[in-house]
């Protein structure tokens, strides 16, 4: 499995995602072009298939260059206009465009749904791309508490409410015991000798949800690894699984930047569409609001202070940015960003974390380690980021949800009308 880095995106360059009704047509086109593949996974719930281990793609692209040269030339020109200075298009991009053109030529008016399997990652601390020390989790001995002092709801808030938590594996902290449902593979081994700095992300996010909805039930699904990275396919499959559990709120504290062709990622969009109209999907905005003040070697080319991230920027998702201790937009929150609906406390928060030694590691944009240190943690950390602001919003919605009387959608509408808990509507013009 190979990861390719585009200008502002990363994807598996040997995989294709295809809508199930189009799968036979696409695999037929691949076969005629001489492309071979290892396996095909299908998800009837998502309505998508994943074709993996593609081989002989460069030869297929050469054939397409002869067959569809004007179309591919236009594609290159369009991409250059959208992303000036972008690296050359990957063979997979050209393969996708060429297959679409061939099938549209054979069947006028028909466009197949085909795309790449992107690699979303955890919406990391500040700075979000790596390097520096600001935003690293810091050891804290205090008991995790509400970001808005004195505003914690009663212990019954959130009772009977299910909150989907798609994140890293969760550390089985005793303070979270009884509040979550997880499979064995969704749990961290508490006996590990050393953790990564991202291993405690799910526990921290979960405690942020429980600040305002301590009686809510967290449905944990691991979609990110120890480095906070994942695949759009596995994230979407997990969304479909959680949707079948009938949760009221879903928290997605991960994301990817806009794709190189400036299109919403079809896989994450398909996952979000699995949820019913009464379920509220909350997602963290990227922490790229202050990239202009970071060293160039830390920032992926093309990422700007207002670059959109997905799934937060999808139409049916509540995108959340972070506010600082004074209720103002945190410097790392994207700006201007009309796709962000709400701002919530996301700086100086204290939450549950791992117990043990943690490798605090900083990398440049190419993934090379700049420096690394081991820091002991005792189950609690102080952290910041849009990840946790999103979780605060998820908790507030869960607290306002009363099964059978007030849906999560109605709780969200009430929260927007009468902001509380330090949550405020986002005004992209301020």
Image (spheres, rainbow, N blue to C red):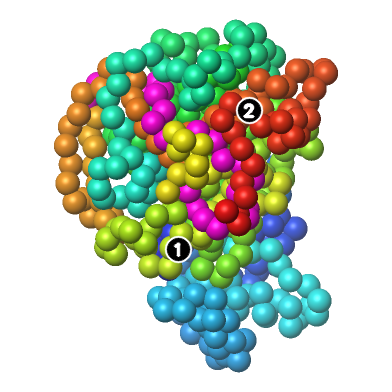
Residue 300 versus residue 123 in the image, above or below: below
Circle 2 crowding by C-alpha within 10 Å: few under 14, some 14–19, many from 20: some
Q: Eyeballing the image, is 115 above or below 108? A: above
| Label 1 packing within 10 angstroms: few (<14), some (14-19), many (20+) | some
Q: Quadrant of residue 348?
A: top left
Q: Which residue is mark 2?
A: 420
**Residue 270, x across and y down, in percent:** 67, 49
User: For the point 43% across and 63% down, which residue is it?
Assistant: 303
Residue 249 is a magenta residue: no
Residue 75 in which image quadrant:
bottom right
**Magenta stretch: includes residue 334:** yes
Looking at this view, is 249 or 171 the one in front?
Answer: 249
Taking depth in this image into account, of 219 and 318 the one nearest to the observer is 318
Per the rendering, the mark at residue 88 is none
Please tell me which of labels 1 and 2 falls first in the chain. Answer: 1
Using the rendered image of the protein, determine whether residue 359 is visible from the camera's viewpoint. yes
Instruction: Find residue 304 and name its label.
Output: 1
Callout 1 touching callout 2 (CB < 8 Å): no
Which element type, helix, strand or loop, lies under badge 1? loop
Which of the pair 148/3 is nearer the observer?
148
- Looking at the picture, does residue 89 appear above or below residue 15? below
**CA distance for labels 1 and 2:** 30 Å
Where in the figure is residue 425, as x and y percent of width and height? Answer: 64, 42
User: Magenta stretch mostly in which secondary structure?
Assistant: strand
SS category of the residue bearing label 2: loop
Q: Is residue 130 left or right of residue 248?
A: left
Magenta range is 333-357
Relative image position of residue 349 (x, y in whole percent): 41, 28
Answer yes or no: is residue 189 visible. no
The structure residue drawn at horizontal position 54% and vertical position 36%, both measured from the top left corner, is: 344
* Picture quadrant where residue 175 is located: top left
Task: Give coordinates of residue 381: x percent, y percent.
Answer: 33, 25
């Amino acid at each position: 499995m190979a990861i390719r880095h585009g200008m502002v995106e990363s994807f598996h360059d040997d995989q294709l995602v295809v809508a199930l009704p189009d799968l036979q047509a696409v695999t037929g086109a691949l076969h005629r072009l001489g492309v071979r593949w290892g396996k095909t996974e299908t998800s009837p719930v998502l309505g998508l298939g994943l074709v993996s281990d593609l081989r002989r793609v460069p030869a297929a692209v050469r054939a397409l260059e002869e067959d569809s040269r004007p179309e591919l030339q236009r594609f290159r020109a369009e991409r250059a206009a959208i992303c000036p200075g972008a690296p050359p298009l990957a063979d997979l991009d050209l393969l996708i465009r060429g297959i679409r053109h061939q099938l549209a030529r054979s069947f006028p008016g028909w466009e197949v749904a085909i795309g790449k399997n992107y690699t979303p990652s955890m919406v990391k601390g500040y700075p979000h791309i790596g390097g520096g020390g600001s935003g690293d989790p810091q050891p804290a001995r205090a008991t995790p508490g509400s970001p808005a002092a004195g505003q914690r709801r009663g212990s019954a808030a959130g009772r009977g409410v299910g909150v989907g938590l798609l994140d890293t594996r969760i550390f089985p902290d005793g303070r979270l015991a009884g509040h979550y449902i997880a499979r064995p593979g969704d749990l961290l081994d508490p006996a590990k000798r050393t953790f990564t700095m991202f291993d405690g992300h799910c526990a921290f996010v979960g405690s942020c949800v429980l600040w305002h909805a301590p009686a809510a039930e967290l449905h944990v699904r691991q979609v990110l690894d120890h480095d906070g990275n994942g695949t759009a396919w596995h994230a979407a499959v997990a969304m479909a699984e959680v949707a079948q559990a009938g949760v009221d709120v879903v928290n997605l504290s991960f994301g990817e930047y806009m794709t190189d062709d400036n299109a919403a990622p079809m896989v994450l969009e398909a996952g979000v569409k699995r949820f019913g109209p009464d379920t509220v999907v909350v997602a963290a905005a990227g922490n790229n609001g202050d990239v202009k003040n970071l060293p160039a070697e830390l920032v992926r080319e093309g990422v700007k202070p207002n670059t959109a991230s997905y799934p937060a920027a999808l139409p049916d998702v509540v995108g959340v940015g972070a506010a600082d201790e004074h209720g103002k937009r945190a410097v790392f929150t994207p700006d201007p960003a009309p796709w962000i609906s709400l701002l919530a406390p996301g700086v100086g928060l204290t939450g549950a974390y791992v117990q043990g030694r943690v490798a605090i590691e900083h990398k440049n944009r190419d993934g090379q380690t700049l420096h690394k240190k081991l820091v002991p943690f005792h189950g609690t950390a102080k952290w910041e980021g849009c990840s946790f602001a999103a979780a605060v919003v998820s908790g507030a919605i869960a607290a306002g949800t009363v099964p059978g009387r007030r849906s999560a959608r109605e709780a969200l509408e009430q929260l927007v009308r009468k902001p509380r808990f330090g949550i405020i509507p986002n005004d992209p013009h301020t």
